[in-house]
Image: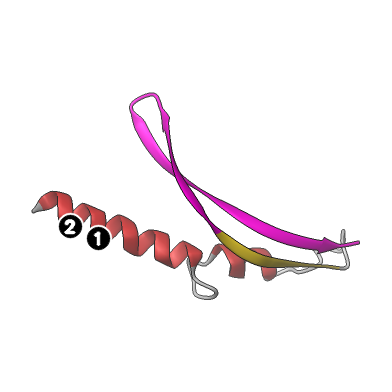
Amino acid sequence: MVGRESERSAQAKLDAFLSWDGPQSIRSAIESDQTLQNVVDTCLVEKGGNVNLVSIGDTNFLTVEFTVTVHI
């Protein structure tokens, strides 16, 4: 039972990171300053996905690819 709860908790966190908005949204964090402190004209997150597991030592991490369009 603990394993299922851990899976649900991990999935909920991943869903929040991949959400289009909200306090945990990676897209929202990137697009909160679309000029990247006036370095570019604009940047937009087009999509996120391709979730993978990476093991470093005894710890597993999830990685997610994001496609970001930047106009300079």
Q: Which residue occupies the extreme left position in the image? A: 1
Q: Determine the residue positioned at 24% across, 54% down.
A: 7
**Could you tell me the amino acid type at mark 2?**
Glu
Rendering quarter of residue 46? bottom right
Q: Is residue 21 left or right of residue 14?
A: right
Horizontal relation, residue 54 to residue 10: left or right:
right
Dividing the picture into quadrants, the one containing residue 36 is bottom right
Residue at position x 60%, y 70% from top?
28
Tag 1 near tag 2, CB within 8 Å: yes
- Residue 8, label in figure: 1
Q: Amino acid at mark 1?
A: Arg
Residue 5 badge: 2
Q: Quadrant of the N terminus?
A: bottom left
Residue 59 within the segment the image draws in magenta: yes
- 68 vs 60, left or right, is right
**How far, Cα to Cα, is label 1 from label 2?**
5 Å
Q: Residue drawn 33% across and 64% down?
A: 12
Magenta region: 49-72
> Furthest residue to the bottom?
21
**x%, y% of residue 72?**
91, 61
Q: What is the x, y in percent for residue 25? A: 52, 67
